[in-house]
Image (tube, rainbow, N blue to C red):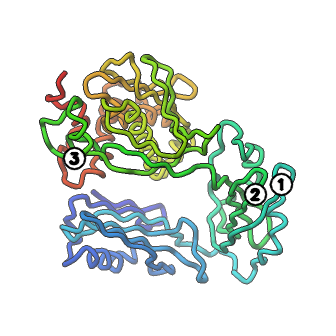
Amino acid sequence: MGEHADADGVLRTYVDPGATLTRAPTARKAIDRFMRAQSKDLKTDRIDLREVDSAEGAATLRVRYQQFHHDLPIVGATVQAVADVKQAAVIQVDHTAEIDVVDAPDPGTAQPLDAVRKSALAPFQGDFESAGVIRDEVVYLRDTTRPSLPDTDYPTASIALLKKGRKPDGALHLVHDLLVETTGPFEHFRVVMDAVSGKLLWLALAGKYVTAGLRVFMPDPVTESDDATVHGGSSTATLDASCRDVQAEVAPAVGGRFRLDGDWIRCTDWDTPAFPQPEETSPDFSYQPYPADRAFLSAKAYYWLDSFARYLRSLGNTTLNTNMVKAEVDAQAYDGADQSEWHGTLTPPRIRFGEGGAPDAGDLGVIAHEYAHGVFDWLGAQHGGSGSYEHSVCDALPAIYRDRFNPNGHRSTETFPFDNNASRGM
C-alpha cells in the first residue's frame, strides 16, 4: 500500500490493495473522483488525457486513459486505473503519461508519407522480392528504447536488418509508425520513421510472434478452490476444473511446427527423464492437466514464466531490464524427483522442475520462485551470499504475484499451496 512519485513530484503509482481509502457509491465513481481529486499530484491537469477503454469484470473495473498532444496520441503515454467493484474503491493506478512535452515537434513540420516512403522501404531491398506500406499512423513517441534482438537470424529477418536505425536519443519525436508488408518471403514489419527529418529510427519484426492458445491452472487448483482435498494426484476432472484458456506469444513455425519458444522463455529437454517438448502444427498448446498429459507441465511453465518475466520488466527497473536474458526450462526434469533448480551459471540460464509429488511445474509459486533466483543474478543482489535471505524473497515475491490472480483471496499468505498441500498423496 502506498504511493510513488518521480523526481519531479509526479504521482506515478498508487496502490491500495485493501480498497480502504477512496470508496464511493460505485467503482466508476471511485475512479472518476480519484482522477479529479489527484489531478494536481498526477499533473494530469496540464495535459490532454482522454478515456479510450474500460473493462469491468466480476472483481475489478479497469479504465485506460490515453494522452494526446495536438490531437495526436503519444505512444505509451497512458494512465490506467483499477477499482475493486465490490468495495467501490480504487486499488491501483499506473501513470506513464508525458508531463513535459516542450520538445514535441509541431505537427505542421511533419513530412507526408510519400516523402518518407522510399527511405522506409530501403532496408528491405535485396533481401525481399517486394515491400510496401500497408498502414501509417502519425503519432508522438518518446525515443528511449529499442526492441530486443534475437540470438540468431529469423527465417524472415536477419539480425543485421533488425539492427538498422539510430540509437535512442530520449527526445519526443513526431513519427510515421508504419506497417510494412514484404513478399519473398512474406512478413510484416513495424517501421518507425521520424516524420520531420525523414530518417529511420528503428524497425521491428511485427510478425515475429504469433498468438498461441494454452490451457493452464489459474493460478492453481488449491488456491482457486480452497479445497484441502485437492492434490497432484486428484482426478483429471477435478484438476481440469481449475484450468483456464489463456494466450501467450510464441515464435513463428519452423518446418511447419510451433514450439513453446518466445522472447524470454524456451521449453527444452536436456535433463532426465527424456520427454520431447511439445510441437504443434497450429499454435495451440491446450492439454489435459498432468498426469493425464505431461505436456501440460511445459505449457503451464512457459505461460507463467513468460507472464512473470513480462510483469517484472513492466516495473521499469533499468538494471533488471538490461541484464535479463532468455532462459530455458525443462518442465519434466530432475530425474522425476520432488525438486527444482535455477542454473544461473549456464548460458543461457536454465530452470528444471521435478515431477515428484505434485509436479513443481504445476504450481505457480514454485515456477516464480525459481525464476526469482534469476532476478537476484541479474540485479547482482546476492547481499553477501545469504541463501536464507535470497530464498525468503524468492518465496515472498511469488506469493505477492500469485495474489493478483486470486480474486477470492484464498491462501494468499502461502507460497506453494498446491505443491505443499498435505493431501497430495506423497
**Percent from the top left, x then y, of residue 367?**
36, 35
Q: Which residue is mark 1?
A: 129
Task: Identify the residue shown where x is 48% and y is 78%.
Answer: 49
Q: Residue at x 81, y 55 (%)?
A: 123
Report the side of 64 relative to 121 (left or right): left
Amino acid carrying label 1: it is Glu
Whether residue 400 is visible, yes or no, is: no
Q: Tags 1 and 3 in contact by the CB under 8 Å rule?
A: no
In front of the other: 186 or 388 = 186
Locate the C terminus and report the quarter of the image it occupies: top left
**Would residue 394 be found to the left or right of residue 426 on screen?**
right
Q: Is label 1 in a helix, a strand or a loop?
A: loop
Q: Nearer the viewer, mark 1 or mark 3?
A: 1
Task: Of the two numbered discs 2 and 3 on the same chain, state the one appearing first in sequence.
Answer: 2
Query: 216 above or below 104?
Result: above
Q: Secondary structure at mark 3?
A: helix
Q: Residue 224 got which mark?
A: 3
Q: Which residue is mark 2?
A: 182
Give the image location of residue 198, x and y in percent.
80, 68
Mark 1 to mark 3: distance in Å? 52 Å
| Circle 1 Cα neighbour tier, 10 Å, few/some/many (<14 / 14–19 / ≥20) | few
The residue under the point 49% across, 48% down is 212
